[in-house]
Image (cartoon, rainbow, N blue to C red):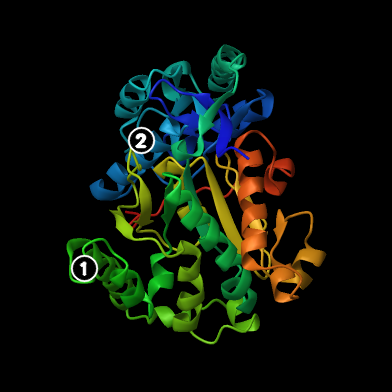
Amino acid sequence: MADTFFGYRRPDGKFGARNLVAVIPSVICTNDITQAICRQVQGTICYCHHQGCCQLPLDLRRVTDVLINLGKSPNVGAALIVSLGCEGTDHERMLEELRATGKPVEIIRVQELGGTSRAIQAGIDAAQRLAMAISGMQREETDISNLTMAIKCGGSDTTSGMASNCVIGYVADKLVDLGATVVFGETTEFLGGEHILARRAVGGENGPVGQKIYEIVNAMETRAKSIGEDMRGGQPTPGNIMGGLSSIEEKSLGAIVKSGHRPIQGVLDYTESIGDKKGLWIKDAPGREPEILTGMAATGAQCMMFSTGRGAPQGFPSMPVIKICGNPVTYARMEHDMDLNAGLIIKGEKSIEQVGEEAYALMRHVLSGRMTSNEALSYFGSVDIFCLGPVI
């Protein structure tokens, strides 16, 4: 089996697993208009979020950067920006940077057009033009080294760390060895295991990458303490505890297994894209699904492998999310939301390596066009951007 997949070649040389028109609201105020446009035009997806105005300048820059990088995703073939006209995000910079990619890009400005109904009509017309413009693109075979895969675990229980996370770790190692890129995050779930990750950093625990790992974990915990709270009141979650995880340290030890065993090349900020970086990377991101999935898609990942034990069904609009279920009982109960049953490892029917190879083969099919369960169900509306300051 050749280590390739079939993707859409973009002007920057990247290959997309999907060929979508991204309709991007520059601010929460245009979410309803964005949704109305997407309901009418096939081949479109929307990134509805809750940010874009009345935030600190730092966060407005973060939101702008993330929306730009979502539009730059290899899975996006064209983009339509929906601007209100008075938002805090820099929609003109969004337009300029997205057009510089060589993709077809348009913008509508609601206030200039005269309001909601006129903006919806103009947006439908623009989205239709964009969808038709990219609809004839054909997939091309490309080497797996052109892949960036994101990884995450959610709805975890004891089987996550013993089965599904191990499967993803196997795939992560294989991809890195083949010259691809893997990105993992959930800084919250490094706590108690950060020293293990730091020792895997390029340059060692005391090098700049190792020290950066300690830095992001300390900053995450300090953020909770700054408002007088102990993060351990929210992690593990009630569902994690019901699933048998007794502490954040135990959860972290299971969570970091999904990163495999290869050296960690560096740490990306939440807003950063991966560019041409190779190997295994960390993205400093929270564990909650809407924020980390958004951050990973903004990285430029063409797909994500998502481990779950209790059953987490959601995906992301432009990034196929492959659900690897570690709990055989959950898989039987939620089969229509899951993509692969790693619970067979728990039952002793298959090895980690066997399921790992199945997961790798499934991923190649998904990259080449096969739908994931959440895509087929249109369960992918969870989008939000991780901000640092208050709404003001």
- Residue 324 position, x and y percent, is 65, 59
Tell me whether the residue at label 1 lies in contact with that at label 2, contact meaning CB atoms closer than 8 angstroms.
no
Query: In what element is the residue under mark 1?
Result: helix
In this rendering, the answer to whether 373 lies above or below 46 is below
- Residue 67 position, x and y percent, is 40, 37
Quadrant housing residue 371: top right
Q: Nearer the viewer, residue 180 or 154?
A: 180
Q: Residue at x 63, y 51 (%)?
A: 322
13 vs 347, left or right, is left
Q: Nearer the viewer, residue 345 or 58?
A: 345
Amino acid at dot 1: Gln
Question: Which residue was labeled with disc 2?
Answer: 87
222 vs 172, left or right, is left
Q: Residue at x 47, y 32 (%)?
A: 74
- Residue 349 position, x and y percent, is 76, 71
Q: Residue at x 50, y 78 (%)?
A: 251
Q: Nearer the viewer, mark 1 or mark 2?
A: 1
Quadrant in which the C terminus appears? bottom left
- Residue 137 position, x and y percent, is 58, 17
In this rendering, the answer to whether 163 lies above or below 26 is below
| Label 1 or label 2, whichever comes before in sequence order | 2
In this rendering, the answer to whether 64 lies above or below 281 is above
Question: Which residue was labeled with disc 1?
Answer: 211
Tally the marks: 2
- What crowding class fits label 1: few (fewer than 14 Cα within 10 Å), some (14-19), or many (20 or more)? some
